[in-house]
Amino acid sequence: NAGVTQTPKFRVLKTGQSMTLLCAQDMNHEYMYWYRQDPGMGLRLIHYSVGEGTTAKGEVPDGYNVSRLKKQNFLLGLESAAPSQTSVYFCASSTMDLAPNYGYTFGSGTRLTVV
Amino acid sequence: AQSVAQPEDQVNVAEGNPLTVKCTYSVSGNPYLFWYVQYPNRGLQFLLKYITGDNLVKGSYGFEAEFNKSQTSFHLKKPSALVSDSALYFCAVRESNAGNMLTFGGGTRLMVKP
């Protein structure tokens, strides 16, 4: 039972480069989320999706794009990386919000450094 | 709007002593409350949750939390701390109505010393 899998686990980018972070879940969850975690800032929501083909902006969406072409996958893209995007990125998934077993399952994170 | 506060950045406790990690919340309606733990270089792991029912919730690794509606609190507790409990703990809340997502607190680092 893999749960939520994030790839890659580590990445170093040069300023201006682009990359895509992949999140895959095997729990048939409807909802998926991308967070970033920075020291002293807790978890901040970047984008989220409430179903296949849908996405929405979270608290800190600027500089990121997302896509959810398949229910099990949620991609986070950085078109032109900036040093301010150096962070640890977490993907999470959950059941629909009124499901009795509601709760988030997190991936193990991607540590991104932009130099 | 919903919000959650963890007033302590760090809690220090000696092994074998009881521990408490504080969490207070603000929602318009009824809350769903969660605690997650993050070990170094790992993702967040679910500890316990309160949705409805008994105010005392028991979770993984011997942790428990008490929902206190009048004080809008959901403090995490354990009777006897272990060194292996040292980690970052996050409280999270959402309103029970549809269309809401979890809001996370800033996290509290728990340090258990031998």
Image: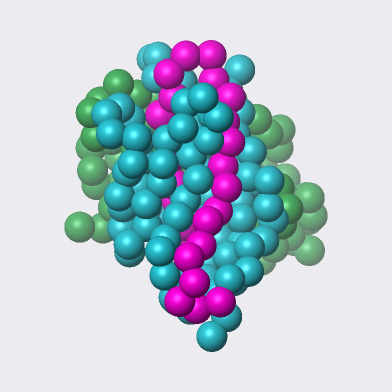
Colour assignment, chain A: green
The residue drawn where x is 20% and y is 57% is A1
| Image coordinates for residue B96, horizontal then vertical, percent | 39, 19
Q: Quadrant of the N terminus of chain B?
A: top right
Q: Residue furthest bottom?
A: B114
Q: Is residue A38 visible?
A: no
Q: Quadrant of the C terminus of chain B?
A: bottom right
Q: Which lettered chain is shown in cyan?
A: B
The residue drawn where x is 45% and y is 55% is B77
Q: Is residue A115 visible?
A: yes
In this orientation, which residue lies closer to the viewer: A39 or B90? B90
| Image coordinates for residue A14, horizontal then vertical, percent | 75, 61
Q: Is residue B27 above or below residue A41?
A: above
Q: Is residue B86 above or below residue B33?
A: below
Q: Is residue A29 above or below residue B78?
A: above
What span is in magenta?
Answer: B14-43
The residue drawn where x is 42% and y is 70% is B80
Q: Is residue B85 magenta?
A: no
Q: Is residue B33 magenta?
A: yes
| Image coordinates for residue B39, horizontal then vertical, percent | 49, 67
Question: Image check: A12 left or right of B79?
Answer: right
In this orientation, which residue lies closer to the viewer: A100 or A34? A100
Question: Image check: B79 left or right of B107?
Answer: left
